[in-house]
Image (cartoon, grey):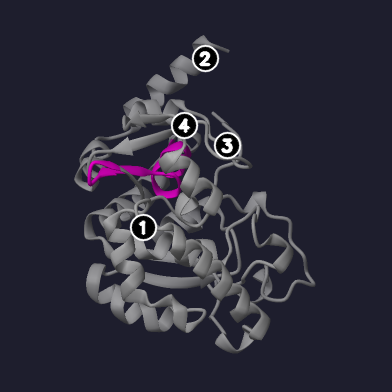
Amino acid sequence: MNLGRTPFDISAKTHDPNAGLRGDYAHMAADYTVPQDMTRYDAAMQDRWQRLLSRQLELLPGRACRDFIEAVTLLDMKRGIPSLDEVNAQLTARTRWTLVGVPGLLPDDVFFTHLAHRRFPVTVWLREEHEFDYIVEPDLFHDFFGHVPMLFTPVYADYLQRYGEGGLKAAALDGLGWLARLYWYTIEFGLLREDGGVRAYGAGILSSPKELVYAVESPTSRRLPFDVLEVMRTPYLIDDVQAQYFVLESFPQLLDETAPDFAPYYRSLDAEAAAHA
């Protein structure tokens, strides 16, 4: 069943052959990786990184989960646009993950293969100034600031590898549309109950000032208990704050509740969709 565009689908991207680093698929390796050339980040990009970073760091206390804040402190991103090679020395020692540079969104099978082998794709280009407040596709700030800190949490890192393995299976079972919703409501827009409140761990929330405040604090934000099947039943929004979020009680819950074989879930969801068609 085709449920529409998935959040990691290369077909979502419009390529601009004159955009330099952005979408330069011509010079990638067979696995879609590209080297990160630190000399390509000019003074304007470094300044933009610092302003994006400063704005988001101010919003983290009381809204981001402890593991994320601890890792952000460890990474010390205030030094400038991070070198993936330098961060890999820390990350691989902590959770056996490696960051790989990519030119943009990836085909599903490539993306899942990287995750299944504990390689996280990080887009090497940074948004333009006119995209400072909103960007329609992942860039270096979203990928690094939003995703990389959580990779230092072992149970989360194990979940992400398992998700990659599940993605390869789902593609063969025509279940990718259902599984994409799990990615969206955990890895991108997940919330966690912690310290008597709700905290964010999803990259889409943590890298967005508007979404971070709304998801955690707004009285109109709908926060539901995490349930795998309910997550897979729930469509998501790609161009606005989410209509609902799903809240974990702990990261081990995320690993435990996504451990079963999803094939029966896909069959059940397909049957439900057919009945309502």
- 94 with respect to 25 (left or right): left
Q: Residue furthest top?
A: 275
Compared to residue 181, the image places residue 157 above or below, namely: below
Which numbered disc, 3 or 1, marks the residue that appears first in the sequence? 1
Q: Examine the rendering and report whether any part of residue 117 can be seen.
A: no
Give the magenta range.
179-197
Amino acid type for the residue under numbered disc 4: Gln
Q: Residues within 10 Å of mark 2 (few under 14, many from 20)?
A: few
Q: Quadrant of the C terminus?
A: top right
Q: Position of residue 13 (x, y in %)?
A: 68, 54
Amino acid type for the residue under numbered disc 3: Leu
- Of circles 3 and 2, the one toward us is 3
Q: Position of residue 210 (x, y in %)?
A: 55, 48
In the rendered structure, find residue 244 and report the number of the disc placed on it.
4
Please give the residue where the numbered disc 1 appears in the rendered image. 61
CA distance for labels 3 and 2 = 22 Å
In front here: 36 or 162? 36
Asked if disc 3 and disc 1 are in contact, CB closer than 8 Å, the reply is no
Residue at 49% in and 30% down: 220
Which numbered disc, 3 or 4, marks the residue that appears first in the sequence? 3
Q: Residue furthest bottom?
A: 39
CA distance for labels 2 and 4 = 24 Å
Q: Quadrant of residue 238?
A: top right
Asked if disc 3 and disc 2 are in contact, CB closer than 8 Å, the reply is no
Which numbered disc, 2 or 4, marks the residue that appears first in the sequence? 4
Q: Examine the rendering and report whether any part of residue 146 can be seen.
A: yes
